[in-house]
Image (cartoon, helix red, strand yellow):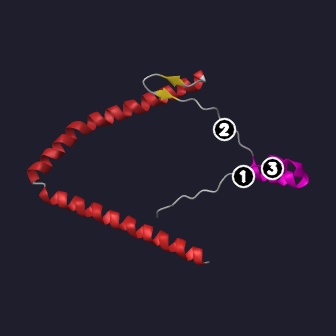
Amino acid sequence: MQNDKIHEQKLQQLKKLDAQLDIIRLDKNAAIEQILTPEVKAQLAAIDAEFDPMLSAVRDAIGKLEGEVKLAVLAHGETVKAAYMAVYAEGRESWDGKGLAGYAVAHPEIEAFKKIGSPSVSIRRS
């Protein structure tokens, strides 16, 4: 129970640090916004208007070509190396854990083949 309190306190500290980071980012953006003159803002908007369509077109082309490469490598069935590498991975084998657990009740010898991985932790920010 004491460890739970320590862990809860650390998670609360983490949340406070995340909030502090957000405040610093907002303050930085506000400071930048204050020094930008209307003329500079207009120039930045013009630059965005000029370059954003080009960036979007190249991102779209990249996405389309990546899809084509993935389909081709899947059909080829092997990793392809060039300037980049398209790594082919075999499909993962999986088993119905609930079904096997039920089967193991009647056939306990199957338990010898069960392996349990290491636990892990992920932090979810809400």
Give the spatial CA distance, label 3 vs label 2. 18 Å
Helix, strand or loop at mark 1: loop
Q: Which residue is mark 2?
A: 92
Give the spatial CA distance, label 1 vs label 2. 17 Å
Q: Residue at x 61, y 24 (%)?
A: 77
Among the two numbered marks 3 and 2 on one chain, the one whose residue lies closer to the N terminus: 2
Residue 39 coordinates in the image, percent (x, y) = 8, 50
Q: Quadrant of residue 92?
A: top right
Q: Residue at x 40, y 70 (%)?
A: 16
Identify residue type, mark 3: Leu
Among the two numbered marks 1 and 2 on one chain, the one whose residue lies closer to the N terminus: 2
Helix, strand or loop at mark 3: helix
Identify residue type, mark 2: Arg
Point out which mark residue 100 bears: 3
Q: Are marks 1 and 3 in contact (CB under 8 Å)?
A: no
Point out which mark residue 116 bears: 1
Q: Is residue 21 left or right of residue 92?
A: left
Q: Main secondary structure of the magenta part?
A: helix
Q: Is residue 73 left or right of residue 102?
A: left
Classify 10 Å Cα crowding around label 2: few (below 14), some (14-19), many (20 and above). Answer: few
Looking at this view, is 101 or 82 the one in front? 82
Among the two numbered marks 1 and 3 on one chain, the one whose residue lies closer to the N terminus: 3
Identify residue type, mark 1: Ile
- Can you say which quadrant of the picture contains the N terminus? bottom right
Q: Residue at x 49, y 74 (%)?
A: 9
